[in-house]
Each structure stands twice: as C-alpha cells, then as structure tokens.
Amino acid sequence: MAKAIRLHRTGGPEVLQLEEVTLPAPGPGQLLLRNRAIGLNFIDTYFRTGLYPAPLPITLGNESAGEVLAVGPEVGEFKPGDRVAVVAAHGAYAEERIVPAAATVALPDDISYEAAASMMLKGLTAEYLLHRTYKVKPGDIILVHAAAGGTGTILCQWGKALGATVIGTAGSREKAEIARAHGADHVILYRDEDIAARVKEITGGKLCDVVYDGVGKDTFMASLDSLKPFGLLASFGNASGAVEAFNLGILAAKGSLYVTRPTLNTHTARRETLVEMAKNLFGAVGSGKVTVSVNARFALKDAADAHRALESRGTTGSTVIIP
C-alpha cells in the first residue's frame, strides 16, 4: 500500500484527496518508481478543473524523480536502485507510481531529485521551445511571458545563454527582479504597462523574433503585437484561460505572422528524441547555464494548498511536492 492524491470529481483544490492505493507489479515495458520529489505544473490544474477532460478517478501529475523499485518484463535499460526522472501521463502525485520505461530517463548524479522533478516538464518544454519550435540564435530578440515562473526562469536563462536579448513580463516588481536574476535583459510589468508598446520601445521598433506565451487568453493579442513581420508566437499554455477562436486574417494584417500550439507529448513521442532532449537539458543544468530554482515545497497531503498557491500567482520558480 502507498499513499496517493486521488481525484474523484473535478472542481477546486478541495477535490484533491489523500488515499491509500495498491499498485500492481510493473508490466511489460514498465517500471515501479519510488518518488522522492514530484513536480507541480499549471497543467495539473487544467485536469483538476475539467478544462482538460480525463477519466475519473485519477491521480494527477506528470513529472517526478526517484529510484526504481522494480522492473517489468522487456525492460533492459533500467534496474532496481537506478536514479531516474520521468514525465508521463498522470500518476505522479503519489509515493509510488508505475511508469513506462520509454518515458523515463537516467538521472545524472549531479542533478538532485527536487531539481529533476521540477524541470522534467518545465525544462523539457523550454528545450523544445528554444531548440525545436524556434531555434534561438545569437542576436534574436525573444519575449517570455511569466518570466519569473518555473518555465519562464528556465527560458530566460537558456535564451540568454544562446545569445538572445531576453524581454520578460512579470506581475510585480519582486517578480521582475527574479526574472532579471535569471537572465532577462528587460522586464515589463504587465499590470502597469502596455506590453506591445514597451516591446516596441525596448527594441527600437524592431520587435521580437519569437514570443513564448504560456499565459494564453490574456496575452494573446499583445503577443501578436510584439512580433516583427514573419515572427512566431509559440502559445504553449493557458494559465489565464484558453485562447479563443480568432480570424486568421489578423496574422496577415500584423505581418504574415506564424502561430503554433506545441505540446511536450508530441515532441517526446519518440524515445530517441526524449533522450536527446533530456541530455541537452541536463547538460545545460550541469554546466551552470541553467539553474533550477525550487522556491516552495509541499507535503503530499498538502497538494490542495500547493494548487491554491499556484493558481493565486503567488509562486515563483518551481514548486515541488515531497511524498
């Protein structure tokens, strides 16, 4: 028996319940993992509220890190005792979880469990955004929304290391300082300033090559208005709600713009790509180019409080749940 947070109905944070669960032995291609740290992500709240439908009951959470307890048949890459990290569909809010070996990567000794759990989803997201959705190069100007958040701080640091000029947005002066400390050259206080107007001022009218927008509905038009002709908007999250339908003609009027809605699942569908992305991410962290800031920790039983903190925009950097 192991403890897990179970969701039997959608709703507010109060629907997250701590229960005892019994896991089966790992099947073919599977691992039994003892979680040491669990990542908290905004996507977890989408499933909790029902914005993203899922069969119930369910244990939320995609990313975690820990040790392999047992391996199923047809698993040759891992053995009990191995340090690993995983990003897989649901099941992370638990002391133990069954995961596909294909979604698991070996964890280098110089990467802590907390850092790994807090960066598998956010860090791999930053990896594909910066290296695959739009390959950032020296001299590029990039805009990162929610620059003080978990994904935002990684995007700022890594974007800066790639030679880009990084503009971030933040909701307070305190968060602006966090963004600057993580590589942002300029920070726009979105509650007090017009984002697109400030981007135009900062860039001397050049505007941005790419905008990384995990906020969604509230920032969509400002993101488009911050792009130079042929610029790319990578809309990768819905923290303020889903982007509503819009007239494609807007993209023509604003300069033959590109818009994409990428997902991590698509990028990691092939194991070879997942391993390559993880190697790139762990290398960036190991070299010091990227520092993962774990600024809040919650016990497993307090997962509801973790969701409240996240949805109140009261968190900075990454938050982990400790089983």
Image (cartoon, rainbow, N blue to C red):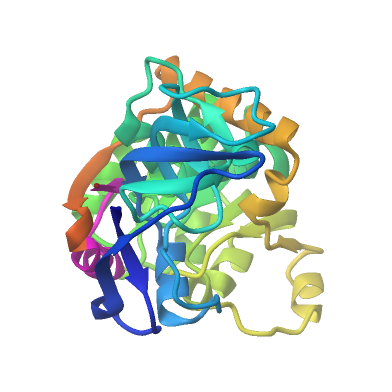
Residue 136 x/y as whole percent: 65, 35
Looking at the image, which is closer to me, 256 or 107?
107
> Count the marks: how many?
0
Q: Is residue 39 left or right of residue 3?
A: right
Based on the picture, tell me whether residue 319 belongs to the magenta stretch.
yes
Q: What residue lies at 29% left-to-right and 72% top-to-bottom?
A: 16
Looking at the image, which is closer to me, 97 or 286?
97
Residue 8 seen in render: yes
Query: Is residue 2 positioned above or below 42 on the image?
Result: above
Residue 12 x/y as whole percent: 30, 82
Q: Is residue 236 left or right of residue 262?
A: left
Residue 206 seen in render: no
Based on the picture, tell me whether residue 273 belongs to the magenta stretch.
no
Residue 173 position by quadrant: bottom left
Residue 195 position by quadrant: bottom left
Residue 144 x/y as whole percent: 49, 51
Query: Is residue 220 positioned above or below 271 on the image?
Result: below
Q: Which residues are magenta?
A: 303-322
Q: What residue lies at 55% left-to-right and 56% top-to-bottom?
A: 89
Q: What residue lies at 50% left-to-right and 70% top-to-bottom?
A: 238
Query: Is residue 212 positioned above or below 53 on the image?
Result: above
